[in-house]
Image (cartoon, helix red, strand yellow):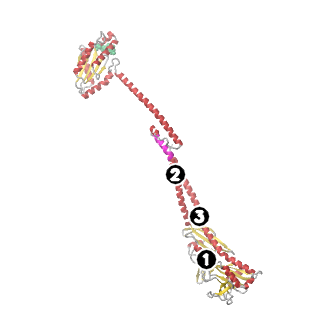
């Protein structure tokens, strides 16, 4: 089974979750932001368009309002046509609030008299009135406005138009023909660099008889100025056009018409110098469009302005994608930072949790795997504040403590037992190397000690001697006095030997009634004296009252060992003992 590390188990899911959360949040937010930015773009565009819409409708409103007002008033007061001066004054006063109201005029149907309020749209010339009946009949001339007589002083500087019959002018004829309110075509004013547009309407009396035609006209240069000065984001465009695409006003400073060979030619969107307007011309349907112009994307909105009396104009607004997409990029960047911060925080949190849980477990793990109770016991009591890990630590420590006590007990018991065994071993060794009857070394004890003594003497250059002695006629002792007495004799001989030799000398019971002595570091004379003393003692101190024994000796004394081994020496003493036995016993052969 594959093993998973605790840290991996915690950190990996955290990292996966953080990534999933981050990607989801980022994607959703980006989609939302994208929508928001599209809406912001759209909203901005519609905001601009609304401002233009309001401006245009407000600007154009007086045309129809005044034309209707004058039509209705005069229709009910045909007698006013008898005093056109008063009407000239009325028109002048009506025009005062509207700086771009170039003309408010009236022409009588019966005799072609004509009056107007005339205003220079650029404000250079005075606002005045003009009539064609005051100075000389049929001559259209300019007069100052006079609050009392309305038609005041003649203005000499203004040109006069001879034989001016308004009834031949398009404004009059079109209105009469239509028998109602009619828009003039948009065209430049004579003498002013501005397009103008007008409304004219026939006035009938209550019986339906044509009395006159009244008209209003406005200079459109104001709208052009307005669009040129409107505050727009970079690379944005606004235009006002007729439904046929002819421009009325635009944010672009290019001229709106040209005069070629005396003929006026309006500039249309399609023929405009700007590629943006040319592209816009291809899509004049009201609504929102996305267009690409010279590799740049634009949001493009077209809105229709329905003016009174069937006139429709179009407002077009184009804003570059970069405006709102740039905003999106900025927001996305911010979002990315937020998402990254969330991701890092979650991963960090996972890491901390893994560390908080994992670290103590790793310590527990390494202490347990070190197979050392002391490592477990030296773990801090507050290894972790996690309840389960804390309890595991406490449990392990308790277990390690108990185990440690048990082991200590065991060690003491083992030590005790080992010491006992050692003592027993020593006793056993002692027993196994000691002759039970005499308390001397037995044959095994002799073998164990004699070689050591030989080596020691050889190393230290000491004299080395071996003596093999045997009780003479011992069989007879047994046979005569019994085996117990034989045993006592053996013990007595052993005691005599011990008494006559040193503690350091090795005295062993070598066979049934044979004794072997290993004497190191003793001169031969001394040795011989001691042996004689043994013989003497046995004579002087009988074993029992009537039982005494003698010994035969084979002796080899070497002043230096010179590499001689025990086997050779034993063989030598054995031979000498044999000689002693064969030559009368109770003697020492050396
Ligand atoms: N009581 C007693 N007798 C022993 C013991 N070990 C050996 N013997 C006896 O010692 C006697 C030795 O006899 P032999 O070998 O014939 O020698 P010997 O009678 O001493 O004669 P020589 O050595 O030739 O002088 C035997 O009768 C053994 O039974 C012992 O531990 N106790």
Q: Residue furthest bottom?
A: 136
Residue 276: image tag:
none
Front residue of 368/121: it is 121
Distance in Å between CA atoms under marks 3 and 1: 32 Å
Instruction: Give the image quarter of residue 264.
Output: bottom right
Tell me whether the residue at label 3 lies in contact with that at label 1, contact meaning CB atoms closer than 8 angstroms.
no
Q: Where does the magenta region start and end? A: 355-369
* Residue position for label 2: 347
Q: Nearer the viewer, residue 298 or 420?
A: 420
Image quarter where the C terminus lies is top left
Contact, mark 1 vs mark 2 (Cβ under 8 Å): no
User: Does 93 appear in magenta?
Assistant: no
Which badge, 3 or 1, comes first in the chain's sequence? 3
Q: Using residue 12 as the reference point, say whether residue 473 is left or right of it.
A: left
Circle 1: element type = helix
**Element type where label 2 sits in the image:** helix
Instruction: Using a 10 Å C-alpha cutoff, classify the residue at mark 1 as few (fewer than 14 neighbours), some (14 to 19) or many (20 or more).
Output: some
In space, the residues marked 1 and 2 are separated at their CA atoms by 63 Å
Provide residue 494's location: percent of width, then percent of height.
30, 17
Where is mark 1, residue-wise? Answer: 222
Instruction: Relative to 375, say whether 169 is above or below.
Output: below
The crowd level at tag 2 (other Cα within 10 Å; few <14, some 14-19, many 20+) is many
Q: Residue at x 68, y 74 (%)?
A: 308
Question: Looking at the rendering, which quadrant does residue 436 occupy?
Answer: top left
User: What secondary structure do most residues of the magenta stretch adopt?
Assistant: helix
Q: Is residue 44 above or below residue 384?
A: below
Residue 498, relative to residue 249: is it above or below? above
**Circle 3 Cα neighbour tier, 10 Å, few/some/many (<14 / 14–19 / ≥20):** some
Q: Earlier in the sequence, mark 3 or mark 2?
A: 3
Vertical position of residue 132 compared to residue 282: above or below: below
3 vs 1, front mark: 1
Which residue is labeled 3 in the image? 38
């Amino acid at each position: 089974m594959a093993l998973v590390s605790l840290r991996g188990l915690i950190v990996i899911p955290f990292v996966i979750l953080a990534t999933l959360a981050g990607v989801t949040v980022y994607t959703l937010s980006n989609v939302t932001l994208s929508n928001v930015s599209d809406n912001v773009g759209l909203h901005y565009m519609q905001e601009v368009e609304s401002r233009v819409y309001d401006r245009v409708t407000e600007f154009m409103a007086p045309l129809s309002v005044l034309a209707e007002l004058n039509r209705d008033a005069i229709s009910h007061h045909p007698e006013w046509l008898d005093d056109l001066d008063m009407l000239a004054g009325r028109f002048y006063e009506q025009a005062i609030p509207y700086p771009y109201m170039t003309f408010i005029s009236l022409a009588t149907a019966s005799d072609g008299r004509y009056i107007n309020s005339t205003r220079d749209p650029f404000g250079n010339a005075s606002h005045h009135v003009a009539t064609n009946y005051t100075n000389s009949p049929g001559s259209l001339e300019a007069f100052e406005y006079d609050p009392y007589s309305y038609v005041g002083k003649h203005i000499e500087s203004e040109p006069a138009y001879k034989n001016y019959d308004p009834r031949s002018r398009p404004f009059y004829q079109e209105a009469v023909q239509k028998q109602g309110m009619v828009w003039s075509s948009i065209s430049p004013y004579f003498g002013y660099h501005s397009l103008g547009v007008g409304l004219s309407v026939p006035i009938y009396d209550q019986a339906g008889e044509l009395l006159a035609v009244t008209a209003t006209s406005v200079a459109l240069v104001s709208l052009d100025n307005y669009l040129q000065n409107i505050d727009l984001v970079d690379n944005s465009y606004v235009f006002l056009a007729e439904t046929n695409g002819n421009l009325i006003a635009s944010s672009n400073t290019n001229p709106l018409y040209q005069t070629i060979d005396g003929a006026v030619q309006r500039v249309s969107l399609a023929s405009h110098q700007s590629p943006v307007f040319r592209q816009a011309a291809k899509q004049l349907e009201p609504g929102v469009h996305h267009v690409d112009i010279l590799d740049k994307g634009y949001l493009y909105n077209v809105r229709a302005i329905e003016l009174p009396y069937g006139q429709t104009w179009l407002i077009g607004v184009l804003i570059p994608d970069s405006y709102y997409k740039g905003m999106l990029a900025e927001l996305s960047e911010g979002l990315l930072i937020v998402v990254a911060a969330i991701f890092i925080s979650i991963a960090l949190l996972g890491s901390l949790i893994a560390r908080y849980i994992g670290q103590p477990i790793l310590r527990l793990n390494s202490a347990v795997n070190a197979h050392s109770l002391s490592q477990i016991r030296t773990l801090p009591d507050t290894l972790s504040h996690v309840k389960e890990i804390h309890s595991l630590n406490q449990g392990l420590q308790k277990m390690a403590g108990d185990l440690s006590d048990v082991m200590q007990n065991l060690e003491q018991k083992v030590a005790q037992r080992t010491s006992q065994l050692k003592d027993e071993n020593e006793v056993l060794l002692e027993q196994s190397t000691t002759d039970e009857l005499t308390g001397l070394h037995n044959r095994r004890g002799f073998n164990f000690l004699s070689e050591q003594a030989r080596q020691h003497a050889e190393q230290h250059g000491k004299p080395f001697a071996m003596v093999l002695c045997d009780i003479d006629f011992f069989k007879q002792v047994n046979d005569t006095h019994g085996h117990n007495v034989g045993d006592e004799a053996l013990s007595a001989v052993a005691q005599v030997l011990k008494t006559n030799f040193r503690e350091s000398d090795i005295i062993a019971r070598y066979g049934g009634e044979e004794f072997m002595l290993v004497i190191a570091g003793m001169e031969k004379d001394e040795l011989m004296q001691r042996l004689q003393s043994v013989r003497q003692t046995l004579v002087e101190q009988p074993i029992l009252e009537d039982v005494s024994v003698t010994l035969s000796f084979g002796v080899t004394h070497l002043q230096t060992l010179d590499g001689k081994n025990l086997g050779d020496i034993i063989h030598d003493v054995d031979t000498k003992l044999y000689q002693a036995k064969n030559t009368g016993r109770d003697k020492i052969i050396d």
